Amino acid sequence: MSQRRNGRLKNGRLKKRVEIGRYLVRDPEIYHGELTFKGTRVPVSVVLAYIAKGISVDEVTRHWPDVSPDAAREAILLAKQAVVEKYNKAA
């Protein structure tokens, strides 16, 4: 059996569901514990990669109808906040 540390198993995987914001979730039972949009198996990283390549939020919702425009915008906002927080602390 794997050892548990700080809410994670020894191998680094989550042992419980963690909701992030209103639309994002990490759940060990969904998509290997990767960050997804709630109620979907759509990885946030994939949607953000498409947005980074120039796809619009409207196009996101056409490709992934279960991802609302508000959910896509929340993912963008949280990604921006994470980058600003990380690099403002590094300065």
Image (tube, rainbow, N blue to C red):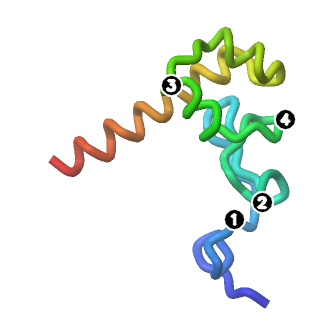
Q: Which residue is mark 2?
A: 28
- Quarter location, residue 70: top right
Residues under labels 3 and 1: Cα distance? 30 Å
Q: Categorize mark 1 by other alpha carbons within 10 Å: few (<14), some (14-19), many (20+).
A: many
Residues under labels 4 and 3: Cα distance? 25 Å
Residues under labels 1 and 2: Cα distance? 6 Å
Q: On screen, 17 above or below 68? A: below
Q: Secondary structure at mark 1?
A: loop
x then y, percent, for residue 13? 67, 68
x then y, percent, for residue 51? 55, 24
Q: Residue furthest front?
A: 53
Frontmost residue, 9 versus 66: 66
Q: Which residue is mark 1?
A: 14
Q: Residue furthest left?
A: 91
Residues under labels 4 and 2: Cα distance? 14 Å
Q: Secondary structure at mark 2?
A: loop
Q: Categorize mark 2 by other alpha carbons within 10 Å: few (<14), some (14-19), many (20+).
A: some
x then y, percent, for residue 71? 67, 23
Residues under labels 1 and 4: Cα distance? 18 Å
Q: Which residue is mark 3?
A: 53
Three-letter amino acid code at the position of disc 4 = Gly
User: Which numbered circle lies on residue 39?
Assistant: 4
Q: Earlier in the sequence, mark 4 or mark 2?
A: 2
Q: On screen, 25 above or below 49? A: below
